[in-house]
Image (cartoon, rainbow, N blue to C red):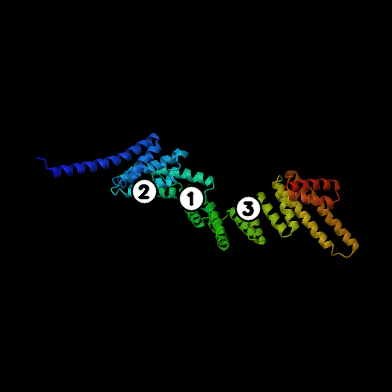
Amino acid sequence: MINMKKLFLLLAVISISLGVIAQKGKVTSANSFIDQGMLDKAKESIDQALTHEKSKAWPNTFFVKGRLCQAIYQADNPKFNSYYPDPLAEAYASYEKAMELDPKGGTKKKVVAGMVYNSLAMDLYNQGSKKFEANDYEGALKAFAVQIKITESDLFAGGIDTGMYFNAGLAAQNAKKYDEAIKYFEKCGELKYLGINPYFRIYECFLGQGDTIKAEAYLLDLPNKFPGDNSVNFHIADLYLKSNKPNEALKYLNLAKAQDADNYSLWYASGITYLNLEKFDEAIAELEQALKLKSDLAETHFAMGASYINKAQAMFLAANEIMDVNKYDAAITEANAVYAKALPYMQKAYEIDPNDKYTMQSLRELYYRLRMMDEYNTIKAKLEALEGQQ
């Protein structure tokens, strides 16, 4: 005689087993759909597995979900964009969950053997690069940070790409997350990646935080780390120029010029600094050297012309203090001669950039003072036409 109690128990066991098999079959189907590129069907199957009691805690459910998320990112198909806001972050979380649910380590072995995290790290690098180019710096930082976490783990096969720390630092710096940026740039320094460049980035982060005192101290210490590196002098000079400390800036500009006498920008910077200090003869000497090195920039010709104009104006002011008529006339004649020296430089600046309003205004003034009325009327009309368009 059949034991009905045992029969019911057997049927219950069979029913449970079939239920588990059915739900795990959803995972298997999802895996197959991924291989076939049928990601919509894969998503449907994996969602069912994730909500069922029999399969929602199965390691392979999350492993396959990770595969699906990566496949969605790689497909780059707008049709799938709504599935996961950030498929790669979801992929990483899914793989980690799969390994967490598998204490025996089978899933971990599968991740390592299949170089799953190598593939994911590459996807994250591509995602971060795209987001950076799109000016989504926070999104780029998030991608690069996960890439770094993966490549530093024992699940990643191969060596560490030191450039990823610099990428993350740049993303953090642009996102104004300066503490994070400093951390990544310091790592670049430890790895001796890109020489002094990461140190300058750290200095810029201190400036970004508004800590000019710390920025200055950090920058002034760099010659101890990189003795003889001329770029340090240039950066220190730039800091002092921005801090309105022109005399300190000139000291470091001169040090930089001593090592790199053919660097146009150093002579130009010195010339502008002297011009702002109203040391016109020194400005003219520096800018003259800048023009010898690079004569095709309107800004240099304009600065040279401005130096002569400002010098002449100072001479006119001094002449007004002279009571003796003959000496006064001589001083005015001398000042006009300096005005005349400005003319060819302003004309050259105008030739290079004929739409610069400030050059045209300076030429108008020069033509008037030098009684060149035809030229004055021409430039005056052009200037009025330009201002009318603005």
- The circle drawn on residue 96 is 2
Instruction: Please say whether residue 112 is visible from this viewpoint.
Output: no
What residue would you read off at disc 3? Answer: 259
Instruction: Please say whether residue 343 is visible from this viewpoint.
Output: yes
Number of residues whose C-alpha sits closer than 10 Å to that of mark 3, classed few (under 14), some (14–19) or many (20 or more): some
Q: Which quarter of the figure has residue 204?
A: bottom right
Residue drawn where x is 86% and y is 64% of the image: 322
Q: Earlier in the sequence, mark 2 or mark 1?
A: 2
Residue drawn where x is 11% and y is 40% of the image: 2
The type of residue carrying mark 2 is: Glu
148 and 252: which is toward the camera: 148
Query: In screen coordinates, is 350 left or right of 62?
Result: right
The type of residue carrying mark 1 is: Leu
| Secondary structure under the numbered disc 1 in the rendered image | helix
35 and 210: which is toward the camera: 35
The type of residue carrying mark 3 is: Gln
Q: Position of residue 100 (x, y in %)?
A: 33, 50
